[in-house]
Image: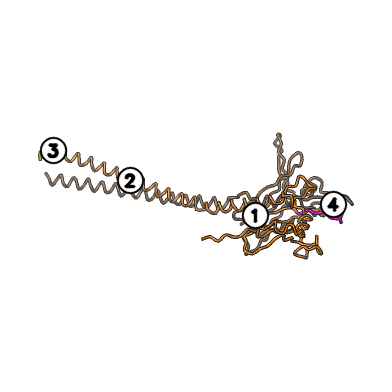
Amino acid sequence: MSLSQNARYFRNSKGQLKIQQMAFVLVATMIFFAIVGLFYFSIRFSSLKEDVGDLRRDEVIETVRKLSGSPEFSFGSWEDCAACVDFDKVMALKERNSYQNFWQDVSLLQVIRVYPEYGSEECTAGNYPNCNKITLTEKEDYESYEAFVSLCRYDGGIGFSRCELGKIVMGFESVENG
Amino acid sequence: MDKIIRFKNIGQNKRGQEEIVGFVLIMVIVAVVFLVFLGIMIRNSGKTGQGDSTIAYQFLESAMEQTTDCALSVGGSYLKLDELISECYATGNNCASGKGACLMLNETLGEMLENSWVVSNGSALKGYEFESVYSFESDSQSDGNEEIVRITKGDCGGSAVGNSYFLPEFPGRIITTFRMCY
């Protein structure tokens, strides 16, 4: 090989080496950013499932609370109180035979007084209103959700309506994950 | 001549390899620094975050409707909790029973919170904070907050969720906040 041919050969080799280096750098950079991106998204979205669960739970709790606005539960005397439940009406509902099958799609439906608490647990015709809980329906195997409401009733002792802090508890059939 | 050229090539290849090793080293250092930074960022956002809580708002809204044992006059109607908070702030008068409105407020709230939220070593709830504050903003920059009642229990150092409920109290408003700490 002549000198000029040699020089040309080595210049081309040098160029090819540079191109190879650049190609390697580009591939390595892409792989690097891909790995970094994978790390970032896996950490960032690791709590996504939990967040979805929390949102669904909030939605169910809101749905439970909306029950206080249904005709069977709503307290008509105070129109500006959407979360007021008529405790007298609920007690009457418990006694009505025509409403026994009304709650068949629900595994648990209870109205519980939180404050103040009285001695007796379950309300009956004998101990009402000095009791803490009215159970409209209760079956087995459920997942329950509760929402705070205001339990209102007419108090003959003071001659006015009295409202107390309570909860509506609803239970739905638990679905086993396969 | 060929030997010289070959020697030169080896030198160039070695230099190329050195460059590649240097580049890889820099990438590894940048990746480690980035991961450390990401870890610190995520840890800090978890610690100080406070989210809105639906159940906290429901609790506040329902609690405000609670009929208290305070009537301003004998035979008069009993105040609801929100009215009692306003009364405690505005006048601090005594109830018909002789007890002060603010004292009645503290007692009623304390018992209500005890019954509603269980705070213990084994419970998920580590603590709670209930606070009612009168807030006033004006054009003359004389705005401020005045605490009406504050009840806390347990430890609220970690993450918390809560919500606020607003009551009108001319010329400002009363902001009642409830936070649950986990």
Residue corresponding to mark 4 = A160
Q: Residue at x 70, y 36 (%)?
A: B141
CA gap, disc 1 to disc 2?
50 Å
Whether labels 4 and 3 share one chain: yes
What chain does badge 4 belong to?
A: A
Q: B171 or A123, which is in the foreground?
A: A123
Q: Could you say whether the residue bearing mark 3 is in a helix, strand or loop?
A: helix
CA gap, disc 4 to disc 1?
33 Å
What chain does badge 2 belong to?
A: A
Residue reaching furthest to the front: A98
Q: Name the residue type under label 3.
A: Gln
What chain does badge 3 belong to?
A: A
Q: Tell me which segment is drawn in magenta.
A: A151-157
Mark carried by residue A27: 2
Query: In the picture provided, is A100 more to the left or to the right than B53?
Result: right
CA gap, disc 3 to disc 2?
33 Å
CA gap, disc 2 to disc 4?
80 Å
Q: Residue at x 55, y 51 (%)?
A: A52
Q: Are marks 4 and 3 in contact (CB under 8 Å)?
A: no
Residue corresponding to mark 1 = B180
Q: Name the residue type under label 1.
A: Met
Residue B12 visible from this viewpoint: yes
Q: Position of residue A96 (x, y in %)?
A: 76, 58
Mark 2 or 4 closer to N-term?
2
Q: Quadrant of residue B106?
A: bottom right
Q: Could you say whether the residue bearing mark 4 is in a helix, strand or loop?
A: strand
Q: Which of the two discs, 3 and 1, sits closer to the camera?
A: 1
Chain painted in brown in the figure = B
